[in-house]
Amino acid sequence: MDKQPNRLNVAVVGSGLAGLTAAAMLRQHHDVTIYERGDVRVATGGQGIIISPGSTRLLESVGFDRKRPGAVPIDGFRVYDMYGKLMEQAPMGLQEAFGDTILAMKRSEFREELLRLACGGDAESEPARLILRSRVTALDASAGMLTLEDGSRVGFDLVIVADGIHSVLRDTIIGNTDFKVRKTGLTCYRVDAPEDSFHKAAAGRERPDWWTSTMEASGSSSMNMLMDTSGRVAAFYPMREMTWVNFSCVVRTTNSTKETTDSWYADGNVKSLLAHFEGFPDVLCQTLRTATECKEWELQELDEIPTWACRRAIMIGDAAHAMTPVQGQGANMAVEDGDSLRLFTPGTTRDEVPAILQLISDIRRHRLGQVLTENRRVNTELTSVTAKVTSNKDFYYNYQGIQHAAAAWKRANNRAA
Ligand SMILES: Cc1cc2nc3c(=O)[nH]c(=O)nc-3n(C[C@H](O)[C@H](O)[C@H](O)COP(=O)(O)OP(=O)(O)OC[C@H]3O[C@@H](n4cnc5c(N)ncnc54)[C@H](O)[C@@H]3O)c2cc1C
């Protein structure tokens, strides 16, 4: 076990995908404590998430095991009209180009695996300590001091703020209150169902192509969509070794009922989901009807912010760059952010913390600026759904990690100097 001197004392605020990835990276050489306001099942929802080859590569370097969450490889994409007629299809060719496919998982099981990487027993490094039901209320970024809900104060060398889209510490780091999340005019319902309900709904009927290409794929599956011209989209893919199906159903927000303070895991209502998708195939509606849990989220995003870091603290994940799920990049960027903390190499001293955080902020802000611009561009300029989903493949899937990004950054800045 690594017991070198100069281990930094690190706090992580929030045990979502960003916080847990950061903790998994930092525990390799430093002492990590995670503060989470909820209990162990916080902020998950059973529905699905897709992770791209670049993120998988970063996570595998600290022991990520894709078999534990039963990840399903996704390497294709099909678009159908609302009656099930095939409109577009694209084999993505990711395995050949990037050595891996996209992985589809239940979000709760992906988070469970990240929790193991951050806090599980390991002969090589000290596990991060997770303190549940412990809400952070304030931050003194110069001192690295956190205030907890019970009024107690705890000091650290380094503070990672990963408290999600409605971050309570964002304004403190930026130094003003100008940056707020805003709604995008789209609502996403998320539901998952065991393959059984999909099978039962299809029983006795001719199986539609969109159904067989989702559930009967061999090797790797595809992400499929049924959509109409008014902007209603039902996207679905298999997960947990093909025994469950995730549905993400997006409609234009007609009657806004949610507060901007709601989060992406707020509960929704299957009846209102079904009302929106009237006229879509019976097999789909019957499957959606069996869902025991439904999440409803009026999609929100955050404008680019001027800095992620202030002295001993840095924001990562949705706290720094909440975006719509159009290109499925939110969690991938959270994983990349977590990886960037590897710049805290063994032996880093407390005095070196602010300069390293500033470098990470500069490098990551630059990349996220490009991601947010692309996310909006594909949404507004591209009409082909395949182009929306598959553009920028190299940029997203070939990311090589922070050491590589930092070397490129230094080369570019030396040239400019
Ligand atoms: C409908 C939808 C589908 C998506 N699908 C994908 C996808 O397929 N692929 C993809 O890459 N991305 C996807 N995303 C985006 C992705 O889910 C998010 O970007 C990601 O979950 C952000 O992780 P996070 O750790 O930053 O925040 P969160 O997961 O929100 O975690 C924040 C954590 O901080 C805790 N917390 C908050 N405040 C405090 C406090 N004061 N003190 C202590 N703890 C606190 C919370 O309880 C929570 O556990 C999707 C998003 C949506 C809305």
Image: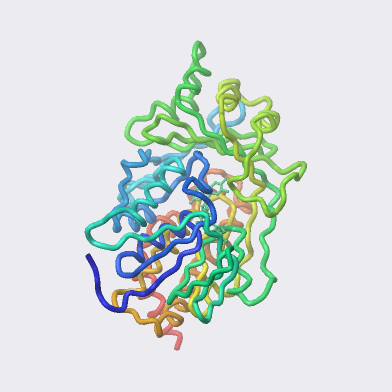
Measured from the top left, where is residue 407 in percent x and y?
35, 75
7 left or right of 132 in image? left
Question: Observer-nearest residue: 387 or 69?
Answer: 69
Colour scheme employed for the rendering of this structure: rainbow
Q: For the view shown, which residue lies furthest in the top direction? A: 204
Question: Observer-nearest residue: 274 or 88?
Answer: 274
294 vs 121: above or below? above
- At x 59%, y 58%, the residue is 165
- Check the picture and name the quadrant holding the N terminus: bottom left
Measured from the top left, where is residue 328 in percent x and y?
51, 50
- At x 35%, y 51%, the residue is 116
372 vs 358: above or below? above
Question: Observer-nearest residue: 355 or 29?
Answer: 29
269 vs 354: above or below? above
201 vs 119: above or below? above
The number of numbered badges drawn on the structure is 0
121 left or right of 113 in image? left
Measured from the top left, where is residue 26 in percent x and y?
36, 66
- At x 55%, y 32%, the residue is 80
Q: For the view shown, which residue lies furthest in the right direction? A: 255
Q: Quadrant of residue 410?
A: bottom left
Measured from the top left, where is residue 199 in percent x and y?
47, 20
Q: Quadrant of residue 141?
A: bottom right
Q: For the view shown, which residue lies furthest in the bottom direction? A: 417
- At x 60%, y 66%, the residue is 137
- Check the picture and name the quadrant holding the C terminus: bottom left
